[in-house]
Amino acid sequence: MAETTIRPPKQKRSHASLERVLTASKSLLEERGFDGFTIQDASQRAGVSVGAIYARFGSKVGLLRAVHMDTMASIEARHEELAAEERDAANAREAVVAAVRRVADIFREREDLLRAFMHLGAVDEAIAKRGSESSIDLAHRFAAAVLEHRGEIRHPDPEKAVDVAYRMAYCTFARQVMYGPTFESDRPIPWDDLVSEIGNACAAYLLSEPGSQA
């Protein structure tokens, strides 16, 4: 599927209408998911005509892609804020645990909206591509924070090990958001406990001598 080009608003009133449509669409996706989302409902909630929405976005897919792009931009701004908070870690263990929690926070803060887009990304190439770009941006920030303490990492390839630790954290939290707490296992673990355990697991993997956990 080709990427969607949105006609930029030229007037202040048009810009306000665009923002209302994006905000309304986000709230509807959070409440009802992708399958329950309609342009008619977005129109009613935003106070913008269906015709105006189609004129701006072209289709429901175009609108959803625009909402996704706007969401990813706000999440990436949050990446930067969270990365700044991690610079004060006193040692590698603190940095790893904090970085894992920041990944978890990104998912937790927009859980319902991200769930909708994860499902949509499975069938929409443009949304999957943009989502991947955002995930990679977060990976780079995770690595930068942890590799500030490179000398404490015991793995012979610190860059690869940090990337693996990020994947463990990211994929665990993504699947929790997408499918719920009992998809892989029927033992539910409270979110905060799960985040703590993943942080400890990543720290043990990165900071222990290879083979010492056998």
Image (cartoon, grey):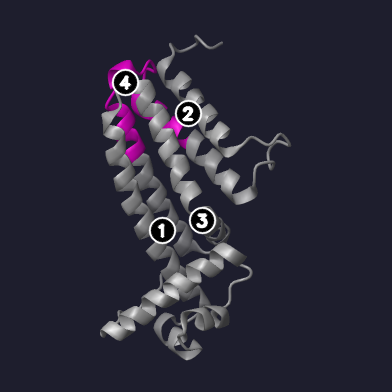
- Give how far across and how far down residue 84 sits, in percent: 27, 40
The answer for how far apart the CA atoms under marks 2 and 3 are is 22 Å
Residue at (30, 27) in percent of width and height? 89
- Give how far across and how far down residue 212 sits, in percent: 50, 9
Residue at (31, 34) in percent of width and height? 86
* Res 190 → quadrant: top right
Q: Which residues are magenta?
A: 141-167
Residue that badge 4 annotates: 91
Q: Look at the numbered discs 2 and 3 and tell me whether their residues touch, using CB distance below 8 Å.
A: no
**Secondary structure type for disc 2:** helix
Q: Nearer the viewer, mark 4 or mark 1?
A: 4
**Secondary structure type for disc 1:** helix
Q: Look at the numbered discs 3 and 1 and tell me whether their residues touch, using CB distance below 8 Å.
A: no
The residue at the far right in this view is 186
Closer to the chain start, of discs 1 and 2, is 1
Closer to the chain start, of discs 3 and 4, is 4
**Secondary structure type for disc 4:** loop
Q: Is residue 20 above or below residue 27?
A: below
Q: Is residue 177 above or below residue 87?
A: below
Residue 114 marker: 3
Q: Is residue 70 above or below residue 189?
A: below
Question: Which amino acid type is shown beneath numbered disc 2?
Answer: Gly
- Give how far across and how far down residue 35 sits, in percent: 63, 68
Residue that badge 1 annotates: 130
